[in-house]
Amino acid sequence: MTPACSIVLPVYNAAETLPECLESIREQTLADWELIIVDDGSDDGSSKLLSQFAASDQCVTVLSPGRIGLVPAINLGYENTQSDLVARMDADDIMSPTRLQKQVDFLHARLDVDVLATQVKLFPDDVLQEGYREYARWQNECLSPDEIADNIYVESPLANPSVMYRRKIYEQHGPYRDGLFPEDYDFWLRLHAAGIVMEKLPEVLLHWRESPGRATRNDPRFSRNAFDRIRAEYLARDPRILSDRPVVVWGAGRKTRQRVQLIEALGVEISAYIDIDPNKIGGKIKQADVHASNWLDQSPKPFVLNYVTNHGAREVIAAELQEYGYQLGEDYLSVG
């Protein structure tokens, strides 16, 4: 019989955190699941733990292809799932007991939604940095399909190990791509470009572990430059950017100009810049004039890309744009 959902769990040298992760799966209120574990060449005792766990539960399958890397391991896991609903999980995180049941019930009831994440809680407190706390706060506020779509160029709006989606999504738009970029963010951007509806349950159903050895801290695929480049790849193809409306960038500082160069290299022409620095206003960046923000109070409206990332600035700029009649997602977007 086909299980209600399949769980894909790649594992590499996670012996320290695996017991908590696996126990949280075993304790799910939804009993009808299968777990596809891909042991990516672990040599720290993880393999023994996985063999013991699989021996105790016929719903668990362990694949041991050797060291193939994270992205091939994830794709291998998906290729071996049976259910129409597939959940992701990471070996250092913990599911809340009702996670799978609530996601399965939601996706059965809401056929218009194809990807469903949950809110998350970071732990342990003693290693959390303020920037990561702020990211989790921001991500937990991106709930509705519109909020996720309108903010997708800021950061990755979904915590990958909290996500469940329909198998057809992977078959139609997968597999995950392997490269010098975060594979999950690339996948969400790809689904967004294809018009796939993504939503988030307004409830913490995943405890998301932070640690000094976490890949997001150490892997070059998660560097600032990697995020900037993958964002630019999809932003430059966004129909709103490719329309006949002039594209205006809010922010004329050096770091902004460096990030804007990525979309310019992909054919996007910037018609003007906005800044609050009187030393920049009235100048030019390449052939584009730099204006004060009130220049945007015009009709017809250009399309604005807000590249300012200073703490609190995004909200201030959004409020001013809305005063001029600009609508998020229709007339402007924020870019991380």
Image (cartoon, rainbow, N blue to C red):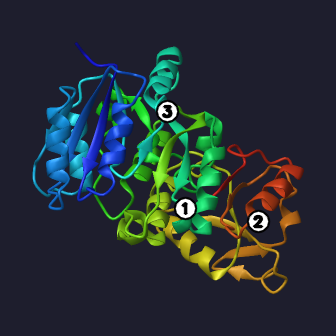
Quadrant including the C terminus: bottom right
Q: Distance from label 2 to label 1 (Cα)?
A: 24 Å
Residue highlighted by disc 3: 116
Residue in the foreground of this view, choosing between 44 and 286: 44
Q: Nearer the viewer, mark 2 or mark 1?
A: 2
Badge 1 marks a residue whose secondary structure is loop
Disc 1 residue crowd, few under 14, some 14–19, many 20+, Cα 10 Å: some
Q: Nearer the viewer, mark 2 or mark 3?
A: 3
List x then y, in percent, for residue 145.
60, 34
**Does residue 35 appear in this view?**
yes
Kind of residue sitting beneath label 1: Val
Disc 3 residue crowd, few under 14, some 14–19, many 20+, Cα 10 Å: many
Q: Which residue sits at x=40%, y=22%?
A: 30
Residue highlighted by disc 2: 313
Q: Which residue sits at x=56%, y=61%?
A: 125
List x then y, in percent, for residue 318.
78, 55
List x then y, in percent, for residue 70.
26, 55
Q: Which labelled disc corresponds to residue 268?
A: 1
Q: Distance from label 3 to label 1 (Cα)?
A: 32 Å
Q: Is residue 77 above or below residue 111?
A: below
Circle nearer the N terminus (2, 3) = 3
Q: Which residue sits at x=29%, y=43%?
A: 9
Kind of residue sitting beneath label 2: Ala
